[in-house]
C-alpha cells in the first residue's frame, strides 16, 4: 500500500472496514453497527492482486484476468501472477501498470518497469512502441458485471522515467546503468473512490491502444497490480 506513515495506513484500514460494512447493510436490515461487527470479524490484512497479459503486435486490446478462474487475452495464468481467490475481496487503495521482459514464459529473474528502457527492451522499435503507443497514448478501463467502474484513464499516469545510477564492474571497469526505482510508490496511482474487487464477480480490466505496437519482445508482458486491504472469506458481499 502506498502509505507514507502508520497514521495514513490505519486510516486506509478503517476505511476498508467501513466499505465492507456498508456493502453488507442489506444483509443486516440496514443496521450499520451489526454490519460493522461482521466486518470486524473478517480477516483483514494488507494484500495485493497481480495480473499479467502478454503483449503482441497483432492486437490493440489486452484484457487481464483478475480471479483464479478468469481468462486473459493470453489464455493462461502465468506463474508470476497472484490472482484473487473467489472467496476473497480486495479493497483497492492504489494500482499500478508496468511492463516486463521475461526471458521465457516462466522466467522470474526480470524486473518490473515503469517505462521502456532501450537497454532492456533492445529489439528495434520495441522501446519506442512501449513509450509512445503504450504509455503515452494507451488507456485503461475497468468493468465489473458489465458496470463501467473506470471508463478510461491514460497509461501515461503510470509512466515514470527514474534517475539512473552507475554500478561499476570491478574487473573490466565497465559501467552498468541501473534505474533508481521505489517499489512502494513509482508507477502506482491512488484510487478515490476506492475500487472493491470481489472474487465472486466478473472483472474486465482492459488496456486499449490507438494502434498496434510496432514491435514486441518474444515474451513481453503488461503487469497490473492492485494493492489494498484483503478481506479473506468475504464474498458474501456481492
Image (tube, rainbow, N blue to C red):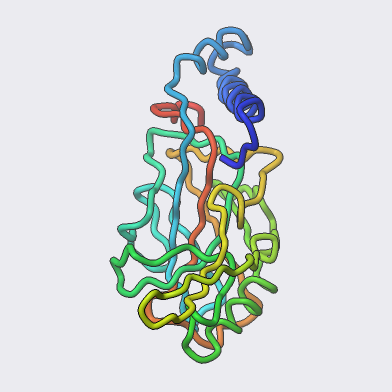
Q: Is residue 228 left or right of residue 5?
A: left
Eyeballing the image, is 109 above or below 168? above
Q: Nearer the viewer, residue 146 or 170?
A: 170
Q: Residue at x 47, y 88 (%)?
A: 123
> Residue 14, how many percent across, how many down?
61, 22
Q: Residue at x 51, y 79 (%)?
A: 59
Q: Is residue 216 left or right of residue 164?
A: left
Quadrant of the image containing the N terminus: top right
Eyeballing the image, is 134 above or below 234? below
Q: Nearer the viewer, residue 148 or 135?
A: 135
> Residue 51, how many percent across, how many down?
44, 55
Q: Residue at x 60, y 84 (%)?
A: 128
On the image, which quarter does residue 195 sit in?
top right
Eyeballing the image, is 174 above or below 20? below
> Residue 12, how many percent across, how many down?
62, 29
Q: Residue at x 64, y 60 (%)?
A: 158
Amino acid at each position: 500500500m502506498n502509505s507514507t506513515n502508520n497514521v495514513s495506513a490505519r486510516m486506509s484500514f478503517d476505511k476498508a472496514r467501513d466499505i465492507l460494512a456498508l456493502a453488507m447493510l442489506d444483509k443486516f436490515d440496514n443496521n450499520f453497527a451489526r454490519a460493522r461487527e461482521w466486518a470486524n470479524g473478517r480477516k483483514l490484512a494488507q494484500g495485493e492482486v497481480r495480473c499479467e497479459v502478454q503483449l503482441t503486435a497483432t492486437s490493440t486490446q489486452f484484457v487481464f484476468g483478475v480471479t483464479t478462474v478468469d481468462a486473459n487475452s493470453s489464455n493462461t495464468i502465468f506463474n508470476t501472477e497472484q490472482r484473487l481467490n473467489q472467496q476473497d475481496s480486495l479493497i483497492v487503495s492504489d494500482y499500478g501498470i508496468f511492463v516486463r521482459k521475461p526471458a521465457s514464459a516462466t522466467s522470474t529473474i526480470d524486473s518490473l518497469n515503469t517505462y521502456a528502457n532501450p537497454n532492456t527492451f533492445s529489439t528495434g522499435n520495441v522501446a519506442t512502441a512501449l513509450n509512445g503507443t503504450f504509455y503515452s497514448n494507451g488507456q485503461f478501463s475497468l468493468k465489473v458485471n458489465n458496470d463501467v467502474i473506470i471508463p478510461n484513464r491514460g497509461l501515461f499516469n503510470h509512466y515514470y522515467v527514474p534517475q539512473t545510477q552507475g554500478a561499476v564492474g570491478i574487473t573490466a571497469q565497465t559501467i552498468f546503468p541501473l534505474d533508481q526505482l521505489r517499489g512502494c510508490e513509482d508507477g502506482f496511482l491512488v484510487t478515490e473512490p476506492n475500487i472493491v474487487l470481489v472474487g465472486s464477480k466478473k472483472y474486465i480490466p482492459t488496456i486499449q491502444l490507438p494502434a498496434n505496437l510496432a514491435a514486441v519482445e518474444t515474451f513481453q508482458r503488461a503487469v497490473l497490480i492492485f494493492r489494498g486491504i484483503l478481506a479473506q472469506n468475504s464474498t458474501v458481499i456481492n
